[in-house]
Amino acid sequence: MKDAYILFRNEYPQNKEEIFSLIKEFCRKHDLYYSGPITGDSLLVRIEGEVYTVDIREEKEDSGSAYWIIYFLQKKHLYLFRNILEPA
């Protein structure tokens, strides 16, 4: 179990279902047990028995092209990643 996992995408996920699908596929590829979203209203997932909160940020390369980062962070360690989650 890790404190955080990070996915990179060229396109913004269109809805929660797509986000959960991406996380599920990530977990499958890395042999992690994914039990799905915890509630319908928030972006919380359970991986390997731990609760992770999901956050999506847009980043821009020097060339100007954009990509998206999907963070899923262990809820109990969110304070450690405040600098990641705070917009610049």
Image (cartoon, rainbow, N blue to C red):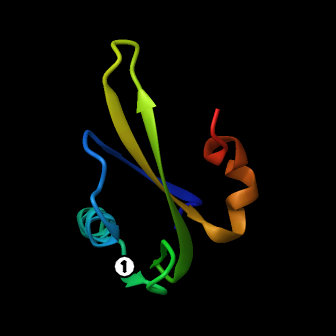
Q: Which of 25 and 65 lies nearest the eye of the viewer?
A: 65
Q: Is residue 44 left or right of residue 3?
A: left
Binning the other alpha carbons within 10 Å of mark 1 as few (below 14), some (14 to 19) or many (20 upward) gives some
* Quadrant in which residue 79 is drawn: bottom right
Classify residue 53 as left or right of residue 63. Answer: right
Query: Residue at (38%, 85%) from the top-left corner?
Result: 35
Residue 57: image location, x then y, percent: 47, 44
Given residues 36 and 57, the one toward you in this image is 57
Relative placement, left or right, of 3 versus 59 is right
Residue 71: horizontal and vertical position, in percent? Answer: 48, 53
Residue 10 higher or lower than 41, as above or below? above
Classify mark 1: helix, strand or loop: loop
Quadrant of image for the C terminus:
top right
Task: Quadrant for residue 3, please give it.
Answer: bottom right
> Residue 16: x, y in percent?
35, 70
Q: Position of residue 69 (x, y in %)?
A: 41, 44
> On the picture, is 56 further left or further right than 7?
right
The amino acid pointed to by label 1 is Tyr
Image height check: is 58 above or below 19? above
Q: Which residue occupies the foreground of this view, 73 or 15?
A: 15
Q: Residue at x 55, y 67 (%)?
A: 53
Q: Which residue lies at the image location 71% right of the left edge and 48% below the top edge?
A: 82
Outermost right residue: 79
Give the number of marks. 1
Q: Which residue is mark 1?
A: 33
Residue at 33% x, 64% y: name it. 19
